[in-house]
Image (cartoon, rainbow, N blue to C red):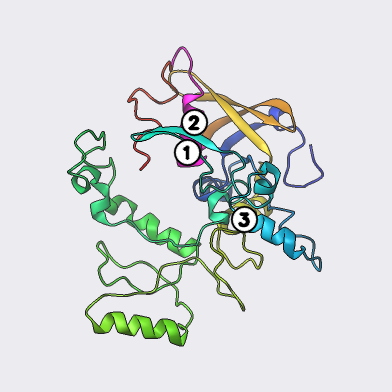
Amino acid sequence: MSNSPYIPEDPGKTDWDVAVIGTGMGGAVAGYGLAKRGRRVLFIEKGLFLHEEFRPAAGAQLEESRLAELADGSNERAETRLAAGRWPLRLQGGTSFGELEFFAPLGCGSGGSTALYGAALERLFPADFQPRANFPQVNDSTLPEKWPIGYEDLRPFYTQAEELFRVRGSPDPLAQGGEAKLREPPPLSPRDQHFLDSFASVGLHPYRLHVGYEFVDDCEECLAQLCPRGCKNDAARICLLPALEKYGARILPQCEVFRLEAGTSHVKEIRCRCNGEQLSIRAKAFVLAAGAFMSPVLLLNSRSEAWPDGLANRSGLVGRNLM
C-alpha cells in the first residue's frame, strides 16, 4: 500500500494481536503500551500521518499565507482542515435545545486532538467521580450516581501518565487525592510572576498549570494548532512514533472505519475504507478510541441482529450525556 516502513503491505491478510482505532490520547497510549509488551499492533487513523504538509522536509518553509490558512479553524475546506490536523467535516447531533450542525473542536490525524490541544494535563478530582451529586438541579438527567471506578483506582495510572507525558507545573494547593508527579516548569516572566504574587496576596491559591510542553527556545505553547517545533508532548510524539519505530507497530493512515462486526460477546472484525477501497481487518482484540464524538457514532452504526440498538448499547446511553 505504501513505501513507508510503518504501513503494512497487506493488512487484511494479517492476523493482528490488537487493532487500535484512533491515534489520539486513548488509542496511541493503549497501542504503545501493548506494542511495548510484544503485541502485534495495527493503528487505524482517519487523518494524515504526522501531518506531512504542515511539517515539510528539513530546510523547507511554508509560505505565510499557507500557514495562516492552516491555522484558521473556521476554514471549511476538508483538505485544508485535514492538513491542519482538524476533523474535516461538520458534525450533526441532537441536543436538549435542538438540532446542531457544527465543526467540532476535534483533531484528525496522528495524535488526534492532542496535536491541537493546549497540553493541559490535570487530574480529575475525587468528587468528579460522583457526577449526579454535582448536578442536583438537572432532574431529567440520566447521569449515574457514581462511576464504576473511583479516583483511587486511577491514581497509579495518573502518576504513570504524568511521567510518560513529561508533565510540568506546580502543585495545586487545593488538590484532593494527593499531589501530581510533576517536572519543574520554566521560570515565569516578570509579568506572570506579578499576577501570581498578586493573586496569592489577596488569599487566592494560584499555581502553575500542569502541561506537557518541553518549553524549547521560542516556545509559543501552540494552542489549537499543530506545533512546528516538536515542543508539544502530544500522543503522536510520545506514544505513536515510539510504538512504530521501537516496537514494530504498524499504521494505516487516511483509513476510515465505518463498521464493527460483532457477535454477542466480541468483535470479530472491522470494516474500513482505505484509498477508496473497502478492507476488513481481523485481530484478537480491538481498541475503539475514536473520541467522545466518533466512538458512539461507530457503535451506533454497527447495529446487527445481536445488537439492534447499536453495538454495546443495551443501556441506551451510547452517545448520550456528552456534556
Structural distance between the alpha carbons of marks 2 and 1: 7 Å
| Location of the C terminus (image quadrant) | top left
What amino acid type should be assigned to the residue bearing mark 1? Phe
Between 253 and 282, the one lying in front of the other is 253
Residue drawn at x 45%, y 77% as measured from the top left:
184
Examine the rendered structure and indicate whether residue 188 appears above or below residue 307: below
| Location of the N terminus (image quadrant) | top right
Residue holding disc 2:
297
Residue sitting at the far front? 98
Magenta region: which residues? Answer: 288-306
Examine the rendered structure and indicate whether residue 29 appears above or below residue 120: above
Q: Earlier in the sequence, mark 2 or mark 3?
A: 3
Examine the rendered structure and indicate whether residue 105 appears above or below residue 252: below
Residue holding disc 3:
72
Residue drawn at x 21%, y 79% as measured from the top left:
203
Q: Earlier in the sequence, mark 3 or mark 1?
A: 3
Structural distance between the alpha carbons of marks 2 and 3: 26 Å
- Give residue 156's position: percent from left, percent from top: 36, 57
- Give residue 21's position: percent from left, percent from top: 56, 38
Is residue 297 located in the magenta-colored stretch of the structure? yes
What amino acid type should be assigned to the residue bearing mark 3? Asp
Structural distance between the alpha carbons of marks 3 and 1: 22 Å
Estimate how packed mark 2 is, as few (under 14), some (14 to 19) or many (20 or more) residues with alpha carbons within 10 Å.
Answer: some
Q: Is residue 162 visible?
A: yes
Residue holding disc 1:
293
Mark 2 or mark 3, which is nearer to you? 3
Between 192 and 166, the one lying in front of the other is 192
The answer to whether marks 2 and 1 mark residues whose Cβ atoms lie closer than 8 Å is yes
Q: Secondary structure at mark 3?
A: loop
In the drawing, what numbered circle is on residue 323? none
